[in-house]
Image (cartoon, helix red, strand yellow):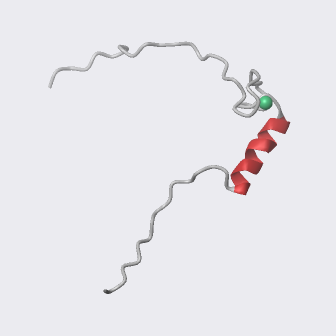
Amino acid sequence: MPPEGKGSADERPRSIRPCPVCGKPATREAWPFCSERCRDVDLHRWLSGSYVIPGRDDDEETPG
Ligand SMILES: [Zn+2]
């Protein structure tokens, strides 16, 4: 096995991510959101089930 070169991955500085809710630049206080308000909005989305959570499909095999 050839030795894998270390540090070959491009190192890119951590760029400021935009708030996933409104798109504004995120702040440290409410990372990764721009404000606590947006964080709540995202949280509510979770609670309401807007996000698709990967789950297991229980297949019920019916004897035919
Ligand atoms: Zn926001």
- List the single residue furthest toward the bottom: 63
Q: Seen in the image, is 7 located left or right of residue 50?
A: left
> Residue 38, relative to residue 8: is it above or below?
below
Q: Seen in the image, is 27 located left or right of residue 16?
A: right
> Residue 9, relative to residue 64: is it above or below?
above
Q: Seen in the image, is 30 located left or right of residue 1?
A: right
x, y percent for residue 5: 28, 15
29 vs 3, nearest the viewer: 29
Quadrant the C terminus occupies:
bottom left
Residue at left offset 73%, top offset 31%: 31
Quadrant the N terminus occupies:
top left
Ligand 1 resides in the quarter of the picture at top right
x, y percent for residue 10: 43, 13
- List the single residue furthest toward the left: 1
> Residue 40, relative to residue 30: is it above or below?
below
- List the single residue furthest toward the front: 64
Residue at left offset 52%, top offset 13%: 12
x, y percent for residue 26: 74, 24
Can residue 47 be seen in the rendering of this structure? yes
Q: Seen in the image, is 34 located left or right of residue 15?
A: right
Residue at left offset 63%, top offset 49%: 51
Residue at left offset 72%, top offset 48%: 45
x, y percent for residue 19: 72, 28
5 vs 44, nearest the viewer: 44
- Occupied quadrant, residue 17: top right
Q: Exactly how many numbered labels are in the figure?
A: 0
Can residue 29 be seen in the rendering of this structure? no
